[in-house]
Each structure stands twice: as structure tokens, then as C-alpha cells.
Image: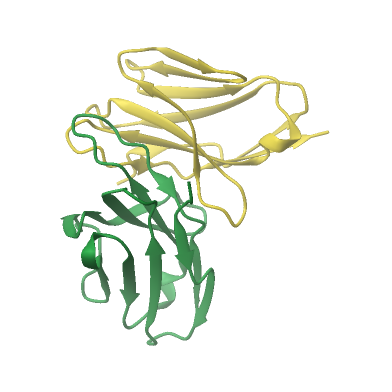
């Protein structure tokens, strides 16, 4: 079974520029997550999709971050405009959707963003 | 507000000895706990978990202990091997939403 795919793996931009990340979850996984991991910290959930609907985006800085999951499969996360503090690894994860259970999350390799 | 804390940023252990990683949590609604392992340039991978109805779960060289009254869990790796050198994240979830809250991680280095 193929894992979660993410691209690009690395991105360097200047502040105030825009950037987009792409994620392809494991086939059949209904739930998709985007996490931000700042150096020295654990991953922090930004947004959770269930199929193509948003379940939780309470920690997404909506003035500059946006995400979509068209057709309930691939997803893109965009930052516009980027700030220095957005430098982090952006992790995508996916899981099945079995009600009443914790569903194991499978993580992609992440995109390391550096904002100069 | 950090609900899951790993107070030791790093741990160095000799090959063959025991590694003990600690994790504390503050949210009493958490009832499912996980450990993830992360190698450089890779995403975290699931290692072992424990439900709040248990106080111990064992999988090969890995054992997780849960002390609910102290809101504390620990991961024991016995014996430690060089391939265990990685960052280990503690995570917790509540059954009302299953969202994961992660600790900051502990970097384990196993010395030959």
C-alpha cells in the first residue's frame, strides 16, 4: 500500500511571498489532516477534512492560510502571504473513518518550509 | 496551552540498555495515548498505543505504562538498539473527537 505523498519536500521563499503544498493521502482514507511542526515542538493540527468537508480548522490562521480538498482525495495547503514564523515542517496525514474508534493516522514525509 | 509535555528533550543510552521516555498530560478527557517515532526527513510513524482502561501494553521490545492518577505515561525500550535512535513523540486523544495532541518530542541517541 502506497503511503501518504507530499510535495514539494523543501521550499525556500521570502516573506510576503505565497506558497502551496500538495498532499495525496492513502487510497481509501476518508480523513485528511494538515499539521504544522515548528522546530523543537510537536506537530500541531491546522485543519482536518472528512472526505471533502472541513471537520476542524480552529487552529488555522485563516487570514493567511487556506486549504482545500477537492473531490475528497488530494489536498492543497496555501500560505499567502508568508511570514518568518511560518518556517516549519508541514505534515499531511490520513486515516480511515471507522466510527467510535481512534483511527491510526499515517503521516507523509512533510514539506520543510523556510521563510527568509 | 501545552496539554502533553515531554520534559526531556534528549536521552542518550548505551546499546543493550533500557531507554525510558516520559510524558505528562493535563487534560483528564484524554483516554488514548500513543507513541510515534520519527527519523530525520521522514514523517512520524506509529509505534505503540495504550487505552486508558489498561495500565500496560507491550509489543516486543517496547512497553508503554500508563498512570492515570498521575497523568503520566512512559515508554520503555529494552534492549535499546542503534536503529532506535530517533525522535519519539508522545500523543494523546480523547474519544469525543479523536484529535491528537503531541508533546515536543524526545531525541534518543543509542551509543554503540
Q: Position of residue B70 (x, y in %)?
A: 36, 18
Judged left or right of residue A59, residue B18 is right
Chain in yellow on the image: B
The answer to which quarter of the image holds residue A20 is bottom left
Confirm whether residue A116 shows in the render. no
Instruction: Give the residue drawn at x 47%, y 55%.
Output: A108
Please say if A89 is above or below B53: below
Please say if A108 is above or below B73: below
Between B34 and A51, the one nearer to me in the picture? A51
Instruction: Give the residue drawn at x 44%, y 54%.
Output: A4
Point out the residue furthest to the right here: B112
State how the image is colored. Answer: by chain
Q: Position of residue B45 (x, y in %)?
A: 50, 42
Between A99 and B22, the one nearer to me in the picture? A99
Please say if B46 is above or below B19: below
Confirm whether residue B37 shows in the render. yes
Instruction: Give the residue drawn at x 77%, y 22%.
Output: B16
Between B86 and A105, the one nearer to me in the picture? A105
Judged left or right of residue A37, residue A57 is left
Judged left or right of residue B21, residue A105 is left
Q: Colour of chain A?
A: green
Q: Quadrant of the C terminus of chain B?
A: top right
Q: Position of residue B36 (x, y in %)?
A: 49, 38
Amino acid at each position: 500500500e502506497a503511503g501518504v505523498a507530499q510535495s514539494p519536500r523543501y521550499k525556500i521563499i521570502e516573506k510576503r511571498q505565497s506558497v502551496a503544498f500538495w498532499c495525496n493521502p492513502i487510497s481509501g482514507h476518508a480523513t485528511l489532516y494538515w499539521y504544522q511542526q515548528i522546530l523543537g515542538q510537536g506537530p500541531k493540527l491546522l485543519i482536518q477534512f472528512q472526505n471533502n468537508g472541513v471537520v476542524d480548522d480552529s487552529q488555522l490562521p485563516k487570514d493567511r492560510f487556506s486549504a482545500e480538498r477537492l473531490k475528497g482525495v488530494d489536498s492543497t495547503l496555501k500560505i499567502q502571504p508568508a511570514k518568518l514564523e511560518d518556517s516549519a515542517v508541514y505534515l499531511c496525514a490520513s486515516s480511515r473513518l471507522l466510527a467510535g474508534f481512534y483511527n491510526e493516522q499515517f503521516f507523509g514525509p512533510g514539506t520543510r518550509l523556510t521563510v527568509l | 496551552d501545552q496539554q502533553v509535555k515531554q520534559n526531556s528533550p534528549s536521552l542518550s543510552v548505551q546499546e543493550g540498555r533500557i531507554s525510558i521516555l516520559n510524558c505528562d498530560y493535563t487534560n483528564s478527557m484524554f483516554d488514548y495515548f500513543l507513541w510515534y517515532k520519527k527519523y530525520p526527513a521522514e514523517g512520524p510513524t506509529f509505534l505503540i498505543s495504550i487505552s486508558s482502561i489498561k495500565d500496560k501494553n507491550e509489543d516486543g521490545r517496547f512497553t508503554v505504562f500508563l498512570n492515570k492518577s498521575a497523568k503520566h505515561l512512559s515508554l520503555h525500550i529494552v534492549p535499546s538498539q542503534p536503529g532506535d535512535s530517533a525522535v519519539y513523540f508522545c500523543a494523546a486523544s480523547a474519544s469525543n473527537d479523536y484529535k491528537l495532541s503531541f508533546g515536543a518530542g524526545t531525541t534518543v541517541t543509542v551509543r554503540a
